[in-house]
Image (cartoon, rainbow, N blue to C red):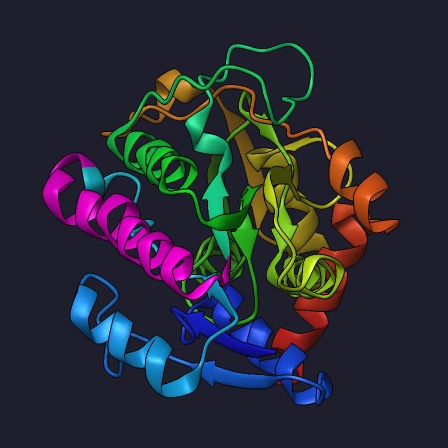
Amino acid sequence: MNIAVTGCYGQLGTEMQKIAAQETGHQWFFTDIDTLDICNEKAVEHFFNEHQIDCCVNCAAYTAVDKAEDEPQLATLVNTFAPKVLAKTCLKHNALLIHISTDYVFGGDADKPYLEDDPINPKSVYGGTKADGEHVIRDSGCNYCIVRTAWLYSSVGKNFVKTMLSLADTHDSINVVCDQKGTPTWAGDLAIAIMSLINHYGTNPVHEVFHFTNEGITTWYDFAVAAIEIAGKTCKVNPITTDQYPTKANRPAYSVLDKSKIKQTLGIEIPFWKDSLAKCIDELKNK
């Protein structure tokens, strides 16, 4: 297959490049804003024509959750309009669109892991634009797999793990929210799952939503404690409540995703979040 990956400089895009180095049976085309504007319909159409694209993995997104409250138009452009352009082009070329979405499409008031068909109720601009992105893809008629993930991190780019480790180097103690529950996701594990979806469906008809995170449930506080302990740092982490750390955007208090569907569909096992965190921190140490 000829596979296009957008947002190739980001956390997930970088991991997809590592996958591509091993998946020699496919032709890969990696793009980011400097080589392809996915909001430009003519440019996307030309790209698909030139490279005869069979599958597009959309890793591009506006992910600055708080900043989105001040930049709703830009967030909408990247998270809603661009997926619409990609979906329309995929439909025309009978290509599979694998689109990455988020736990923030949910309201966060559940008491058990969210299923794929549970009602969505985003509480932030970011979550709303990602929810709208899902809607335009579903309405397009193209072949798609929407993959919702959460708390994504890796050894590249800006993310929670790297921020905590950086703060631990300069502070004796830090405060981290302890009353928001979810599951971290190592971008390396998500990339492997995406590759499995590509190989499973190929160019066959598919219209599915999947959830993928690592296994387990934790809080941002416990996530930070684990990262600092695994990295061998001594910074103390203090638990605080959401009320004590006000942010512009509302975060879901509970956003654990049920992964039964993707595990059954692909026949895969998903690593526990702490095990994957250790792998990522090991990568960081060896950089």
Determine if the magenta segment contains residue 93.
Answer: yes
Q: Quadrant of the C terminus?
A: bottom right
- Whether the magenta-drawn stretch holds residue 210 is answered as no
Q: Which residues are magenta?
A: 69-96
The residue that appears at 34% across and 55% down in the rendered structure is 61
Who's the residue at 37% across and 60% down the image?
Answer: 92
Nearest the eye: 263 or 214: 263
| Depicted 245 relative to depicted 68: above or below | above
Q: Residue 239: which quarter of the image?
A: top right
Q: Is residue 119 above or below residue 286?
A: above
Left or right, 158 with reference to 256: left
Q: Which residue appears at 75% of the width and 67% of the height?
A: 279
Quadrant for the N terminus in the image? bottom right
Q: Is residue 222 left or right of residue 62?
A: right
Estimate the x, y position of residue 282 in percent, counting from the top left: 72, 73
127 lies left or right of 283: left
Image coordinates for residue 196, horizontal then vertical, percent: 74, 61
Query: In the image, is residue 13 above or below residue 251?
Result: below
What residue lies at 50% left-to-right and 19% top-to-bottom? 253
| Number of dots carrying numbers | 0
Q: Is residue 120 something one can see in this rendering?
A: yes
Say which quarter of the image contains residue 111.
top right
Is residue 172 shown to the viewer in this render? no
Is residue 166 or residue 92 the one in the foreground?
A: 92
Q: In the rendered view, does 129 fall on the left or right side of 116? A: left
Q: Nearer the viewer, residue 245 or 203?
A: 203
Q: Position of residue 266 (x, y in %)?
A: 81, 50
Q: Picture quarter containing residue 278?
A: bottom right
Main SS of residues in magenta? helix
Q: Position of residue 3 (x, y in %)?
A: 53, 76
